[in-house]
Image: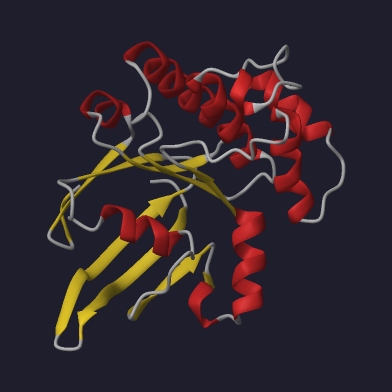
Amino acid sequence: MNEVLIELKNITKSYRITKNNLLKVLKGIDLNIYKSEIAAIVGKSGAGKSTLLHIIGTLDKPDTGTMFFDKKDIFSMMDKQIADFRSKDIGFIFQFHHLLPEFTALENVHIASRIAGNDDDKRAKELLIEVGLEDRMHHKPSELSGGEAQRVAIARALVNSPGIILADEPTGNLDTENADSIIELIFKLRDKFKQTFIIVTHNEEFAGKCDRIIKMSDGLIINE
């Protein structure tokens, strides 16, 4: 068994809909994520998949429970420390690439490293070459195809050498050919950089290729 990277214990999360109506989204999640694995989280809409991903990414905090990242108790830290941790140790890939339209592909990737305190664009260039965009790095998002824009987003997620990359439906907005290409790229990057990925997906073929499938239903993990 690989070394544990993330350990979740009794994670719960609710949202107040009205004064008297509380929506329980996560109902006690216990989960380990291992270094260098690609884990798929699957389940019907409303199962709590994206909420769980947001908590792992520290975009939201649980109501109860703990999360250890490389043995550090993340939610016991101050907000500033959590923000620093998020910018350096977590990469995000979303269904829509969320690139800044006024900047080139290279600038979009480099901005992420500058936020983390690195002003050298060397790694940004290397990663764009790695994802197959050597000839497109000076193009703006409007000049890129959907698959190319998602490759830029993947390079951006990798630029700070994060401990983990969280992907929420990374192929959901792509046609079959581009989706297959992105799936192949993710496995290639894992093998080269020993990168850990957690991927929320409805793509059964994609999930089936992952090292582990984590199935959620009604706020709980029901099968691994």
Does 215 sit left or right of 134 as displayed? left
Name the side, left or right, on which 123 lies relative to 152.
right
x, y percentage for residue 125?
77, 27
**Where in the figure is residue 150, as x and y percent of width and height?**
52, 28
Residue extending furthest toward the bottom: 19
Q: Is residue 157 visible?
A: yes
The answer to whether residue 191 of the structure is visible from this angle is no
Up the image or down, 136 lies above or below 10; here it is above
- Which residue is drawn at the image coordinates 29% and 38% (left, top)? 201
Q: Residue at x 25, y 76 (%)?
A: 14
In the depicted view, which residue is nearer to us: 144 or 102? 102
- Asked whether, in this view, residue 98 is left or right of residue 120, the answer is left
Q: Position of residue 217 (x, y in %)?
A: 13, 55
In the rendered image of this protein, does residue 198 appear above or below residue 62?
A: above
**Residue at (57, 34) in percent of width and height:** 153
The residue under the point 41% across, 23% down is 183
In this picture the colour scheme is secondary structure
Report the residue that reaches farthest toward the right: 120
Count of numbered circles in the view: 0
Q: Position of residue 131 (x, y in %)?
A: 61, 21
Work out whether residue 137 or residue 125 is closer to the camera in this orientation and state it: 137
Q: In the rendered image, which quarter is residue 109 located in?
A: top right
